[in-house]
């Protein structure tokens, strides 16, 4: 992938409260297959080993799911969802 990846202000604000970081989001977009998402956007998912506590409960895996737009000169991440299981 040769396009730069930029996170919107909203996406950046959501990283820490949701338990991920920009490196995981970038890695997910660069290495996982893209699928259509709502409002003409795209999404992809990647599972990361977690083996830690989140909100008082232990989880083995964390899944990062960025929602993004593939624009002509860059990829813009609109938001990021994180799931624990």
Image (cartoon, helix red, strand yellow):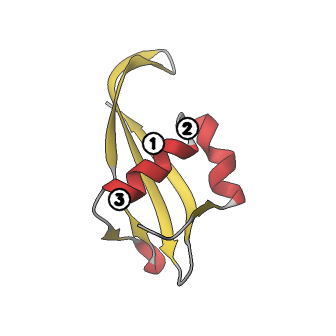
Spatial CA span between label 1 and label 2: 6 Å
Q: Is residue 53 left or right of residue 21?
A: left
Q: Quadrant of residue 59?
A: top left
Give the structural element (helix, strand or loop) at label 1: strand
Residue at numbered disc 3: 44
Q: Which numbered dot is residue 18?
A: 2
Q: Where is residue 41 in the image (x, y as percent from the top left)?
A: 45, 74
Residue 81 vertical position relative to residue 58 in the rendered view, above or below: below
Q: Are marks 1 and 2 in contact (CB under 8 Å)?
A: yes
Q: Distance between the residues labelled 1 and 3?
A: 12 Å
Query: Could you classify mark 2 by the number of other residues whose Cα lies within 10 Å: few (under 14), some (14-19), or many (20 or more)?
Result: some
Taking the spot 27% from the left edge, 62% from the top edge, the residue there is 33
* Identity of the residue furthest to the bottom in this view: 72
Indicate which label's residue lies in the foreground, 2 or 3: 3
Give the residue number, with chain letter if any, for mark 1. 82
Left or right of 69 on screen, residue 60: left
Label 3 crowd bin: few (<14), some (14–19), many (20+), radius 10 Å:
many
């Amino acid at each position: 992938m040769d396009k730069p990846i930029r996170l919107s202000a909203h996406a950046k604000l959501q990283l820490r409260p949701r338990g991920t970081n920009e490196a995981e989001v970038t890695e997910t977009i660069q290495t996982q297959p893209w699928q259509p998402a709502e409002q003409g956007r795209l999404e992809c998912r990647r599972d990361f080993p977690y083996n830690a506590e989140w909100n008082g409960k232990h989880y083995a895996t964390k899944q990062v799911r960025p929602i993004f737009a593939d624009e002509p000169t860059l990829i813009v991440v609109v938001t990021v969802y994180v799931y624990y299981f």
